[in-house]
Amino acid sequence: MSKKVGEIQRNEDFCIPAGDKESESSLSPDQWPLLLKNYDKMNVRSSHFTLLESGWSPLRRPLNEYIKYGMINLDKPSNPSSHEVVSWIKRILKCEKTGHAGTLDPKVTGALIICTDRATRLVKSQQNAGKTYVGVLRLHDTVSQKKVDAALQRLTGPCFQRPPLIACREASIAYS
């Protein structure tokens, strides 16, 4: 009976053994095709390397190592805030530190990148990445494509915004 791929990957070792420089055979380029005539003069890295005794194969890596250096791409649900979701992840995974790459509004769903423990230093590399919002528009009547395009064009680029009449901030025009 044949083994499944997962069993083979778990049980067998797929490490490349360290090579000896003496064991490398020198090939004669005399019988190579024309395009490979100067192949032996190329600056090529040898296959010799020093085998490190630290680290794990990805299939044998303990779960706590994945959590220690983890990044989670989470599809955030609609009602909780980004901070709430990150605190839930921190409590579930029992990790010391968690951080997220950019806040999503509470009513917004979408991809929230959460980093755990030692991966939290990578958050800054993702925070400046822009956000893209996708929305669904339902109209009560048939509207021509030209009118929709014109309305969307007015919303593209910098625009003046007036805060709501009932707001926590002082009412002034914001330019964004």
Image (tube, rainbow, N blue to C red):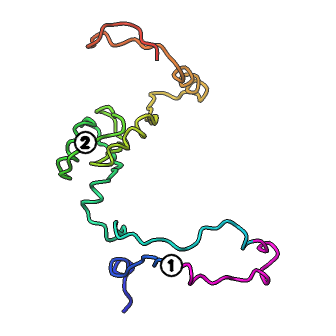
**Magenta residues, start to end:** 19-38
Nearest the eye: 39 or 50: 50
Q: Amino acid at mark 2?
A: Val
Q: Is residue 138 left or right of residue 90?
A: right
Amino acid type for the residue under numbered disc 1: Gly
The answer to which quarter of the image holds residue 50 is bottom left
Q: Residue 70 in magenta?
A: no
Residue at point 20% right, 53% down? 93
Residue 50 seen from this side: yes
User: From mark 1 to mark 2, how far is it between C-alphas?
Assistant: 46 Å
Q: Is residue 20 magenta?
A: yes
Q: What residue is drawn where x is 76% and y is 80%?
A: 29
Crowding near pointer 2: few (<14 within 10 Å), some, many (20+)?
Answer: many
Does the rendering let one see residue 132?
no
Find numbered disc 2 in the image and state the secondary structure of the residue it sits on: helix
Sequence-first tag of 1 and 2:
1
Q: Nearer the viewer, mark 1 or mark 2?
A: 1
**Residue carrying label 1:** 19
Q: Is residue 62 left or right of residue 175?
A: left
Q: Picture coordinates of residue 120 (x, y %)?
A: 32, 44
The quadrant holding residue 77 is top left
**Residue 175 position within the rendered picture, expressed as x and y whole percent measured from the top left:** 46, 13
What residue sits 45% from the left and 32% below the top?
137
In the rendered image, the vertical position of residue 74 relative to residue 169, given as above or below: below
Residue on which disc 2 sits: 86
Quarter the N terminus occupies: bottom left
The relative height of residue 42 versus residue 138 in the rendered view (above or below) is: below
